[in-house]
Image: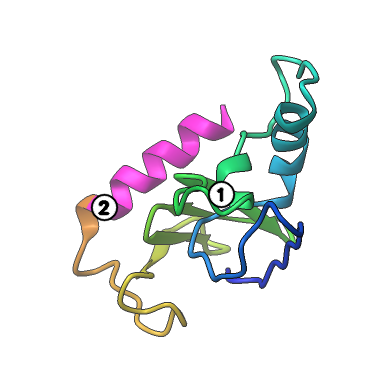
Amino acid sequence: MHVPFILQWKGTVKPGVSEATVCQIDFLASFAKLTGQPLPHNVDSIDTLDAFLGRSERGRKELVLEAFRQLSFRSENWYLVPNISRDGTRRAELFDLSVDPSQKEDVAAKHPERVEQLLKRLEEIRR
């Protein structure tokens, strides 16, 4: 879930570290804004230029990830992995990245309402 990203633009971006959530799919919208180019309305990209340039600690609020046909979902500091077993039962894993950035403690049982909220939001995004 955490992948280093390095950006250098002498005279524009000051050296530092950011915790902003950004994604490579946001390059399109961000660079379009930077260069003043129009962006088609149906593009899955969000302008996070201020985060890239170090002007904001806020990037994306939500991010859907997919690897090996498995979706996962990050919403602010919550990270959800909706697992579906072969028998069709659903058991999601939930991690609070604000206290567990290494994702070692599944807190789904402690926060069932958050699990349901995030599953619902993920389904809305998928539609």
Q: Residue 13 has which mark?
A: none
Rendered residue at 37%/59% (across/down): 78
Q: Residues within 10 Å of mark 2 (few under 14, many from 20)?
A: some
Query: Which colouring convention does the figure follow?
Result: rainbow
In reply to whether residue 124 is colored magenta, the answer given is yes
Q: Residue at x 66, y 51 (%)?
A: 23
The region drawn magenta spans 114-127
Identity of the residue drawn at 23% across and 69% down: 109
* Secondary element at tag 1: helix
Quadrant the N terminus occupies: bottom right
Determine whether, in the image, residue 66 is placed left or right of residue 95. right
Depth check, front residue: 110 or 4: 4
For marks 2 and 1, the one nearer the N-term is: 1
Q: In the drawing, what numbered circle is on residue 114?
A: 2
Residue 5 position, x and y percent, is 69, 67
The residue lying toward the viewer, choosing from 16 and 65, is 16
Query: Is 6 in front, or is 4?
Result: 6
- Which three-letter amino acid code belongs to the residue tagged 1? Ala
Asked if the residue at tag 1 contacts the one at tag 2, i.e. Cβ–Cβ closer than 8 Å, the answer is: no
Task: Give residue 51's mark.
Answer: 1
Residue 92 within the segment the image draws in magenta: no
Q: Quadrant of the C terminus?
A: top right
